Image (cartoon, grey):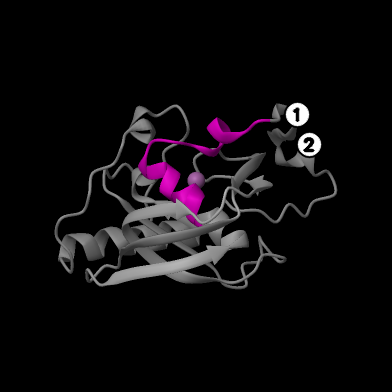
Amino acid sequence: MIRPVLRMGDPRLWRRAREVEHFDTPELDALIADMEDTMRDLAGAGLAAPQIGVDLRVVIFAVEGNPRYPDAEVVPRTVLINPRLSPLSPETEEGWEGCLSVPGLRGWVPRWSRVHYVGRDALGQPIERTVAGFHARVVQHECDHLDGILYPMRIRDFTRFGFVDELFPAGGAGVAE
Ligand code: NI
């Protein structure tokens, strides 16, 4: 079921979400199905449970030939629960991001270049990955949602934060949202 996405300003987006304690349950499967329906409907690259008002540490993301991100590398379809993320070096890189909770806007956001993350899938099986590039950016953006952080809070140069059609009048902002 497609669910409404909360927009920036809704206080439910500022919470630190709760850990999932029970895996492989009908409730968790239903939540993930709703998140996937909602992300697909909006052609997003990722979605966090708090964005549909659910106070749990669940994120999903995928970039598989998404027409909104023609230049983005493929990121495998992932359900990541109770994630823990750590940078592998102090190196950061900046890139454009959007967010389904901040519609119509884009910002230039610094992120760790390479990260290691662990978590669990819907069955409770462990996930562990070392990633870089767009994958690293997407997972950092989504995990931030679980701590009540939206990407505008990470922006340093506010001359590179604005409306998509003003920033990119010729189109082609292939970025995470
Ligand atoms: Ni977002």
Q: Earlier in the sequence, mark 1 or mark 2?
A: 1
Q: Amino acid at mark 1?
A: Thr
Disc 1 residue crowd, few under 14, some 14–19, many 20+, Cα 10 Å:
few
The mark total stands at 2
Q: To which quarter of the image does residue 164 belong?
A: top right
Q: Quadrant of residue 35?
A: bottom left
> Residue 122, position in %: x, y?
26, 67
Is 160 positioned to the left or the right of 10 in the image?
A: right
Mark 1, ligand 1, within 8 Å: the answer is no
Relative to 52, is 162 above or below? Answer: above
The residue that appears at 28% across and 45% down in the rendered structure is: 54
Query: Which residue is found at the position 37% from the left and 31% from the top?
Result: 14
Which residue appears at 54% of the width and 31% of the height? 153
Give above or below for 133 relative to 171: below
Q: Which residue is mark 2?
A: 166
> Is 129 positioned to the left or the right of 151 in the image?
left
Task: Please provide percent x and percent y for residue 16.
Answer: 31, 37
* 122 on left or right of 171: left
Say if 152 sits above or below 127 in the image.
above
**What is the C-alpha distance between the residues marked 1 and 2?**
12 Å
Closer to the camera, 14 or 140? 140
Q: Secondary structure at mark 1?
A: helix
Question: Secondary structure beneath disc 2?
Answer: helix
Whether residue 44 is visible here, answered yes or no, is no
Q: Is residue 148 magenta?
A: yes
Q: Nearer the viewer, residue 67 or 147?
A: 147
Q: Residue at x 57, y 40 (%)?
A: 103
Q: Residues within 10 Å of mark 2 (few under 14, many from 20)?
A: few
Which range of residues does the magenta coloring cover? 139-156
Which residue does the numbered mark 1 point to in the structure image? 159
